[in-house]
């Protein structure tokens, strides 16, 4: 077994060199051999029959699973990624791996699995509850799963890194993710650390381990080991229950609220009427902890994307995105939500303002991190 394991790993490593795979794919698969060993050691015990990697991309972790299981399946909705994975598998002549191009929202596997991996993909699907139900349904009764979410610190961490490397595209993409969190939108967003566990437990699973990664005192990822799913019937579905896509964070965010109010007051030519400006300040002061943690990022979105404030006027922004925005903005309760929606639309268009100040953006980023560190009781100094 050990020999054939080593042979398959060697064949995959050779195929990676010959495959013309993207450098990211090559690196990710190479790194994963060691990382998956460590992950499986944490998740044991389970049978080593069949494993599934949900949201596998180009087989980033799937190839490393081959060394441990008789049969491995990777599923992903991205055609390009799946084709790349299939090409590498063909070149390596690994027979016990299969890649399926399908959306986990609809795909029903023929078998159940001893081990399921779902690493950092929940933020991409329409409903996390539905995703978790699918995972539980795929697990054998004695099976185990490793599941991880991107949490509230993930986008701020990536925003910080994008600022350090002056990467406009990455900055816009992660602001987009953060704003989705604000408005509780579906798709690319994040989940509050700790909010996946109760979903698994409501479905009768035992969560045997929960571990968080932290960046400057904020949770970036939530990692769970889950086992012993109960038989899931249509009655035990909790799909009708609220999909806790976004929940308020506990704690006092008065410092961030005050800083945001300050930014609004000092911002020149905001395009807001005096009434709208007061309304915005009031909402920032009174907003629930769903908004407060990321108010400085909302100010950052304004700097980078520009023209996200004048949602109540018929300014340049509204003419750019048209009446659709006005119609949906009218359904949202307050100016903060409407501004987030505007920023999302601009981010969706993907055009950062040509001339924004990296210094001003860095300043907001630094302030956010300092406040986060103080809240977490950490010493001064910023963790990159
Ligand atoms: C952030 S990547 C994570 C990839 C991989 N699990 C890893 O650890 O690097 C998210 C992956 O989920 C896939 N994905 C998104 N929505 C999906 C869906 N509905 N069904 C299957 N895969 C999906 C994406 O195509 C992408 O490859």
Image (tube, helix red, strand yellow):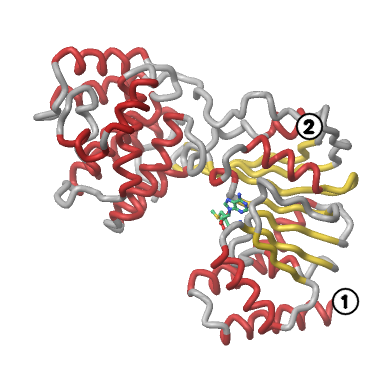
Seen in the picture, residue 31 relative to 195 is either above or below; the reply is below
Neighbor class of circle 1 (other Cα within 10 Å; few <14, some 14-19, many 20+) is: few
Of residues 78 and 381, the one drawn nearer to the viewer in this rendering: 78
Neighbor class of circle 2 (other Cα within 10 Å; few <14, some 14-19, many 20+) is: many
Residue at point 54% right, 36% down?
191
Residue furthest to the left: 269
Name the quadrant where ligand 1 sits.
Answer: bottom right
> Which residue bears the numbered disc 1?
1
Seen in the picture, residue 342 relative to 281 is either above or below; the reply is below
Query: x and y percent of residue 178 in the render?
Result: 41, 38
Q: Is residue 23 left or right of residue 267?
A: right
State yes or no: discs 2 and 1 in contact (Cβ < 8 Å): no
Q: Is residue 106 left or right of residue 139?
A: left
| Quadrant that contains the N terminus | bottom right
Of residues 19 and 69, the one drawn nearer to the viewer in this rendering: 19
Q: Is residue 67 left or right of residue 242?
A: right
> Which residue bears the numbered disc 2?
203
Mark 2 or mark 1, whichever is nearer to me: 2
Query: x and y percent of residue 309 in the render?
Result: 22, 29
Residue furthest to the front: 323
Seen in the picture, residue 95 relative to 308 is either above or below; the reply is below
* Residue 27 position by quadrant: bottom right
Query: x and y percent of residue 88 in the render?
Result: 63, 78
Q: Say which element carries label 2.
A: loop
Q: Is residue 285 left or right of residue 17?
A: left
Residue 142's label in the rendered image is none
Q: Say which element carries label 1.
A: loop
Residue at point 17% right, 52% down?
354
* Residue 334 position by quadrant: top left
Residue at point 62% right, 38% down?
128
Q: What is the distance, in whole Å, between disc 2 and disc 1 at their CAs?
A: 36 Å
């Amino acid at each position: 077994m050990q020999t054939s394991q080593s042979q398959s790993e060697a064949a995959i490593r050779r195929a990676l060199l010959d495959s013309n795979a993207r450098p990211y794919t090559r690196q990710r698969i190479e790194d994963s051999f060691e990382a998956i060993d460590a992950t499986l050691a944490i998740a044991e015990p389970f049978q080593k029959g069949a494993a599934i990697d949900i949201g596998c991309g180009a087989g980033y972790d799937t190839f490393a699973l081959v060394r441990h299981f008789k049969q491995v399946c990777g599923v992903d909705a991205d055609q390009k990624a799946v084709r790349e994975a299939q090409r590498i598998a063909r070149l390596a002549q690994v027979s016990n791996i299969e890649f399926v191009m399908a959306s986990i929202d609809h795909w029903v596997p023929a078998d159940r699995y001893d081990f399921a991996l779902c690493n950092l993909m929940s933020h991409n699907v329409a409903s996390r509850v539905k995703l978790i139900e699918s995972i539980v349904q795929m697990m054998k009764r004695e099976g185990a799963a490793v599941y991880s979410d991107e949490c509230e610190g993930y986008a701020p961490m990536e925003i910080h890194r994008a600022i350090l490397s002056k990467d406009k595209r990455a900055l816009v993409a992660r602001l987009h993710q953060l704003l989705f969190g604000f408005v509780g939108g579906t798709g690319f967003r994040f989940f509050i650390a700790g909010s996946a566990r109760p979903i698994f437990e409501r479905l009768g699973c035992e969560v045997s381990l929960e571990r968080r990664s932290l960046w400057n005192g904020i949770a970036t990822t939530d990692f769970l080991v889950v086992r012993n799913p109960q038989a899931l019937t249509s009655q035990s579905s909790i799909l009708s229950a609220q999909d806790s896509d976004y929940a308020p964070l506990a704690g006092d965010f008065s410092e961030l609220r005050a800083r945001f109010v300050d930014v609004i007051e000092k911002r020149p030519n905001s395009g807001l009427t005096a009434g709208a400006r007061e309304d915005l300040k009031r909402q920032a002061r009174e907003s629930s902890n769903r908004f407060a943690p990321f108010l400085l990022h909302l100010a950052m979105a304004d700097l980078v994307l520009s023209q996200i404030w004048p949602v109540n006027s018929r300014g340049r922004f509204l003419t750019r995105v048209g009446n659709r925005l006005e119609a949906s903005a009218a359904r949202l309760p307050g100016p903060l939500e409407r501004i987030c929606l505007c920023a999302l639309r601009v981010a969706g268009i993907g055009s950062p303002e040509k001339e924004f100040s990296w210094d001003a953006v860095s300043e907001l980023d630094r302030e956010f991190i300092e406040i986060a560190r103080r809240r977490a009781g950490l010493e001064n100094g910023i963790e990159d």
